[in-house]
Image (cartoon, helix red, strand yellow):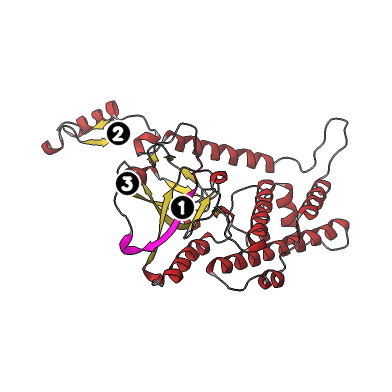
Amino acid sequence: PDQLDGELMLAPGFITPPNSDYAGYHNYINANLPPESPHLYGLHPNAEIGFLTATSEQLFKTVFELQPRDSGGGGGAVTTREEKVKSIVDDIMDKIPDQFNMSDIMAKVEERTPYVVVAFQECERMNTLMQEMKRSLKELELGLKGELTITSDMEDLSNSLFFDQVPPSWTKRAYASLNGLSAWYVDLLARLKELEGWTSDFNLPNSVWLPGFFNPQSFLTAIMQSTARKNELPLDKMCLVCEVTKKSKEEVTQPPKEGAFTHGLYMEGARWDTNINSIADSRLKELYPIMPVMFIKAVTQDKQELRNLYECPVYKTRERGHTYIWTFNLRTREKPSKWVLAGVALLLQI
């Protein structure tokens, strides 16, 4: 016990107690233990803000689901549940574009480079999703008209549309997302626009919107494959290097000769300081600061720089866990253990 006396901190602001008996330790803890806070666990105060916000959103979502299914003002016309669902169905059906014509797209290409293969795969996945959306919405439309018997799947779809949730049958074929249906559909149209631009000439965009992929890992792998083929290097000896630039998407005027510029990522638990070119503590109430354009290139493992780097995990959504896709090594002036404790990660969607 004498060896623990002095400067050792059991937690921020909580110095080890002097040598004492059982009752003395109890009294010391009761008198000196700091109040529970994110700082006590190595987290930023934003972590508590994020937790309370998520809890509030879940509470309001539950309250909304408990509301009566029909809504109307005093003396005004009542909008029934079926009418609202029918309006949503019509709105989505009017805006959803045609599927990609894979025969025409493939005919544009002479050489199937790794990037071209990724584009084909993304178009096929998008076609599968849009086909299911059109099929299920058409089926529900006929059910609402009384031309088909309402099935359990149609009932689930109707409930999802009414509560602004992405239907389960769409989720199975879609990308990971925590958005409600309205925001999810806007994001879907943005992804379609990005794919249409890419497949028009198959030239790699100046800066690639990494969150816009169904499978971002395939694009990151394509960077390694492309570099390995060009320089005749073994693919199993390649790794990715991530360099954070000081540019925004609009400032990137042409793609790099090797690798790719990417944008659209967010950082949780910290922020990127372009002045010092390093990870830095978050600003209060900035929960998910956006990252500048990132330059991702492939090098052989023996040329990889490992000093003063934080191995930052990249996830598709705030759920983390099963949405993990890669690890980017980011520069840090602090010890990497600080960012590990703070749970710092990059997110493709917030």
Q: Is residue 262 above or below residue 117?
A: above
Q: Is residue 226 above or below residue 75?
A: below
- Please report contact status of discs 3 and 1: CB closer than 8 Å, yes or no: no
Mark 3 or 1, nearer chain start: 1
- Please report contact status of discs 1 and 2: CB closer than 8 Å, yes or no: no
- Residue in view at x 59 percent, y 49 percent: 178
- Residue 152: give x, y in percent of width and height: 74, 61
The quarter of the rendered structure image containing the C terminus is top right
The quarter of the rendered structure image containing the N terminus is top left
Spatial CA span between label 1 and label 2: 37 Å
**Residue 212 occupies which quadrant of the picture?**
bottom right
What is the three-letter code of the residue carrying label 3?
Pro
Mark 1 or 2, nearer chain start: 2
Q: Mark 1 — residue? A: 295
Q: Does the magenta segment cover residue 115?
A: no
Mark 3 or 2, nearer chain start: 2
Q: Secondary structure at mark 3?
A: helix
Q: Mark 2 — residue? A: 12
Q: Secondary structure at mark 2?
A: loop
- Residue 66 lies left or right of residue 28; in this view the side is right
Q: Secondary structure at mark 1?
A: strand
What is the three-letter code of the residue carrying label 1?
Phe
Spatial CA span between label 3 and label 2: 18 Å
Q: Residues within 10 Å of mark 1 (few under 14, many from 20)?
A: some
Q: Residues within 10 Å of mark 3 (few under 14, many from 20)?
A: some
Spatial CA span between label 3 and label 1: 21 Å
Q: Mark 3 — residue? A: 336
Tell me the magenta residue range. Answer: 285-303
- Residue 111: give x, y in percent of width and height: 58, 73
- Residue 69: give x, y in percent of width and height: 77, 43
What is the three-letter code of the residue carrying label 2?
Pro
- Residue 52: give x, y in percent of width and height: 51, 36
